[in-house]
Amino acid sequence: MADASEQARAPQLVLVTGSAGRVGRAVVAALLAQGHRVRGFDRLATPGLSDQIIADITDRAVIRHACQQVHTLIHLAATPDDVAEPVQDLFGPNIVGTYEVLEAARLAGVRRLIVASTAQVVWHQRERGPFPIRVTDPVTPRSWYAATKVFLEAASRALQESFGLEVIVARLGWCPRSREQVEEIYRTSWAPDVYLSPEDVGRFFACAVSCTLPAPYYIVFVTSRPAHREILDLEPARRLGYQPQHTWPEGLPSDLLTA
């Protein structure tokens, strides 16, 4: 009989919510490259993925059906900070949707839950230090969007404590979605130190699916290699085997390259 570490490394059925987004597409590609079976879930079609469900994560019946036979769930689906206007736009996907996804995972017997949080939950430490910011530092969310990610982290912790799922909270750095965001990173002195390329984000989640966890509830910061200094402590992610390959602006998709 295979031991737990061998089972974790074996190809698994992985459900990825938000699979059609920039991060989602990178994660799906990395998982497929490792030989995992991947099921996508998004309101839009996910290119190149045969097993996918096109629906909203707030649809209880559909998300519960999607979780059947899933070993690992990667929860990326959310309204991002740059389109959350008015704040009511956050409530459905980021609060109600989080509840539906986590409850569906629990009911289906999902063994590992990997949730996408944000480094914006420690925003004000970035202004005053000390550095690097640790995963154990108190949260100081930047905005209502970041506050919904604090809710996600806390809800995931409750699920782990009460029902024994393995949980990885990935506080992601800045994976730009537009040319305007790329230009902002160029203008902002600290931004290249928290940049996260699509290939590196895919690399992290592929690693998180198959790694052995040091603790059943585990928080990490995820960025590419800092350009100047390590603002966010990457050591917890390194313990999972994550080794970023890019430094700003390496890895920028061609559609985001500025003239």
Image: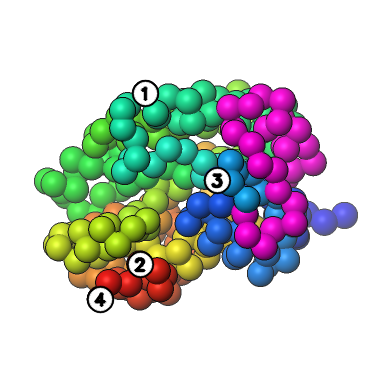
Which callout, 1 or 2, points at the residue further toward the start of the chain?
Answer: 1
Which callout, 3 or 2, points at the residue further toward the start of the chain?
Answer: 3
Q: Residues within 10 Å of mark 2 (few under 14, many from 20)?
A: some
Which callout, 4 or 3, points at the residue further toward the start of the chain?
Answer: 3
Q: What residue appears at the point 34 percent right and 40 percent down from the top-left corner?
A: 83
Q: CA distance from mark 4 to mark 3?
A: 30 Å
180 and 33: which one is in front? 180
Q: Amino acid at mark 1?
A: Gln
Q: What residue appears at the point 34 percent right and 35 percent down from the top-left corner?
A: 84
Which segment is the magenta one?
Answer: 46-72
Q: CA distance from mark 3 to mark 1?
A: 19 Å
Image quadrant of residue 223?
Answer: bottom left
Which callout, 4 or 1, points at the residue further toward the start of the chain?
Answer: 1
Q: Amino acid at mark 3?
A: Gly
Residue named by callout 1: 88
Residue named by callout 4: 259
Q: Where does the image place residue 3, in percent across and percent down from the top left? A: 78, 54
